[in-house]
Amino acid sequence: MIAEPQLLELETHLPANLANEILDVLKNKNVQLTITKRRSTKLGDYRRPTSKVKYHRISVNGSLNKYSFLITLVHELAHLEVFETFKSNILPHGIEWKNTFGQMLKNLLERNIFPDDISKELASYAQNPKASSVSDINLMLALKKYDEGNQPILNDLPGQAVFQIGKKIFQKGQKRRTRFLCKELTTNKMYVVSGLAEIKLLDTINNISVI
């Protein structure tokens, strides 16, 4: 099985000087890597070999910045390592995966691949990784600083700001841990919205996008 995408494409998605190393890992582990278009429901996924498909399959969102891409790829490679060691007799994000992923992150941190602000938050996250890095708001905020275009998120807005997600227009309300209680202005229904949700800030009078 030849890993795809190949070297040149990997170089555009990874921090400098890592593409050859990652490509070797993919080939040695018999992995098909697919770089996808942006998906709102997940950053990446792993599928183990089956009776019909004899190789591992990993996908990662190509819209991620290079540091988020690397962390997501390592997240999925940790699933692969755990499957090879324990097969299917464990929880997907159980202690075996946490230990494996955490150690892989610590190995990366020792190589000074990440900027200082990401390294600080990633070191904390690696102590007890969650099923999704999105669950760690401090890590996600550090990573989002390196997104191309730096799309604003709900956390960036002041209280009572009016914003748009999709076709719905909301007003930002009180914070509940990592989420905000927001009013949908057309219906006055209340929604709980992640602080990391990407938004369009609107002019409160004319509902015209200003970001």
Image (tube, grey):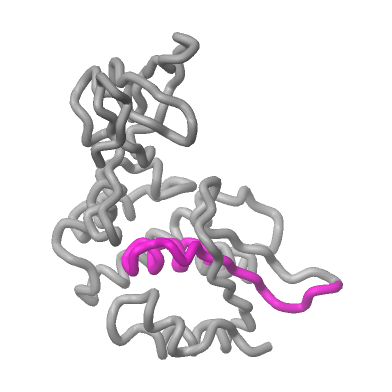
Res 176 → quadrant? top left
Q: Reply yes or no: does residue 98 show up in magenta.
A: no
The magenta segment: 52-76
Seen at 25% across and 27% down, the residue is 203
Q: Find the residue positioned furthest to the top.
A: 188
Residue at the extreme left: 116
**12 lies above or below 203:** below
Quadrant of the image for the N terminus? bottom right
The image shows residue 99 at horizontal and vertical percentages of: 44, 57
- Asked if residue 88 lies left or right of residue 70, the reply is right
Q: Residue furthest front?
A: 206
> From this viewpoint, is residue 154 visible?
no
x and y, in percent, of residue 143 in the image: 27, 55
- 59 falls in the magenta region: yes
User: Which residue shows up at 25% across the image and 56% down it?
Assistant: 123
Which quadrant of the structure image shows residue 5? bottom right
Residue at the (17%, 65%) spot, across then down? 115
Residue 113: % across, % down: 24, 73
Q: Which residue lies at the image location 33% right of the left edge and 55% below the top edge?
A: 126
Tell whether 79 sits left or right of 65: right
Q: Nearer the viewer, residue 14 or 102?
A: 14
Query: Can the viewer see residue 192 in this picture?
Result: yes
- Give the quarter of the figure containing the C terminus: top left
Q: Is residue 25 above or below residue 179?
A: below
Pinpoint residue 162: horizontal percent, then vertical percent. 29, 23
